[in-house]
Structure formats: C-alpha cells, structure tokens
Amino acid sequence: REQYLGLLEMSVAECPEDDRNMHYLGREYMFRGRWDDCIRTLERHLAMPSATWKDERCASMRFIARSLHMKGETAKARDMYFRAIAEAPHLREPYVDLASMLLETGEMYGAAYFASLALAITVRPETYICEEKAWGSLPHDLLAVALYYTGDRTCALAEAEAALSFEPSNERLQNNIRLISASLCEK
C-alpha cells in the first residue's frame, strides 16, 4: 500500500481525465489524513464531465465531508453530507456518516433522524462503494445511543439489541444494553 499513493499520483498526472483514478487518489489522500489534498482532488473529480456515476460522486462528497469535519469545519461537512445524500439517496453510507458526525457533535435528534433514514434503506447495492459498516451494527448503534440521550429509552433498547445481533460478542454493545435496561427499571 505504501507505493499505491505514488502510483495513483503518477497515473492522474499522466491521464488527468481518468475520473476513476482521480476518485481513488482523493480517497487515498483521505485514508492518509491529507485532508486538503483530499478535498482539492475530489472537488476536481466532481467537476469532471465524465464523473457521472452517482454512487461514486456520493462517495467523493462523503470523503470531502469527512475531511472537512477532521479539519474542524463541521458546518461545511454537514452541507457536503447533504449533497452526498441528494446525489445518491438510495445509499445508506451518507446517512450513516452524517448520523455519526451529528452524534459526535451532540446533535442527538439529528443523529437519530439520519440513522433512521439509513435503516429505512433495505436493499443493499452490489457495488464496491457499499461499505460493510453501513450494513452491520453501526446504524442501529448510532440510533440506540441517540434515542437514549433524547429520552426514548424503550426504542433505544430495541435498537441496541438489533446492533448486538450483528456483533454478539461486542462488550460495548452488551454494556449499552445493560445501561439502557437499568435506566428503564429506574423509571
């Protein structure tokens, strides 16, 4: 993987109209924490006339949003996540990413809303863009935590149990169920 970045940079320099490699290069910058390079490269990708596959465009927008968030530009990141959702509303990933960011920033109602929208998508696309985390415990876990903090403990417990069904040996998810159950008994 060390040589991958150099090869991608060379490929894009030699063939700057290759939208797929432009996307891959921007994604690789994100993986390496090179936020500004990621943003700049993926904005170039989105501006390319040949970059028409909505799922990949959505991924570029998500990666830009993630980079903006990592730079502390949360409002711009949120706007970019909205663009990603509008670009490919049939994908779970942008909803899950936005819900995760909102949970991290303490916006529990927003996190619950977008996690719920992610879970409403039940047909999993068969493309490389589809990420395992969006189809596992994560959206249920995000929803459970957000619901817990908004006071809807009964629904939070159901979502925590759904999250645990994907990862039965996950101690954090097990502890969440114990915590939520205990809070229900206190009422």
Image (cartoon, grey):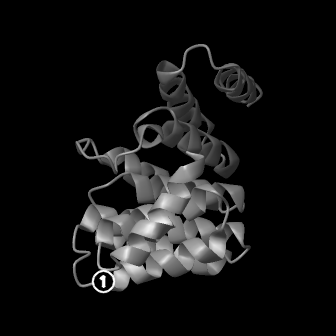
Depth check: give the residue in front, 14 or 54: 14
Q: Is residue 57 left or right of residue 138?
A: left
Where is mark 1, residue-wise? 48
Q: Is residue 128 left or right of residue 159?
A: left
Q: Position of residue 165 (x, y in %)?
A: 48, 20
Q: Is residue 132 above or below residue 24?
A: above
Q: Position of residue 8 (x, y in %)?
A: 46, 62
Helix, strand, or loop for circle 1? loop
Which residue is rendered at x = 26% and y = 41% of the image?
124
How busy is the neighbourhood of tag 1: few (under 14 within 10 Å), some, or many (20 plus)? some
Depth check: give the residue in front, 55 or 95: 55
Residue found at the very far top of the displayed protein: 169
Q: Position of residue 39 (x, y in %)?
A: 55, 76
Which residue is rendered at x = 53% and y = 39% of the image?
138
Q: Is residue 175 above or below residue 6?
A: above
Q: Is residue 163 visible in the rendered structure shown here?
A: yes
Quarter-of-image position of residue 35: bottom right
Q: Position of residue 46 (x, y in %)?
A: 36, 79
Depth check: give the residue in front, 124 or 182: 124
Q: Amino acid at mark 1?
A: Met
Q: Is residue 15 above or below residue 132?
A: below
Q: Which image quarter holds the N terminus?
A: top right
Q: Is residue 62 visible in the rendered structure shown here?
A: no
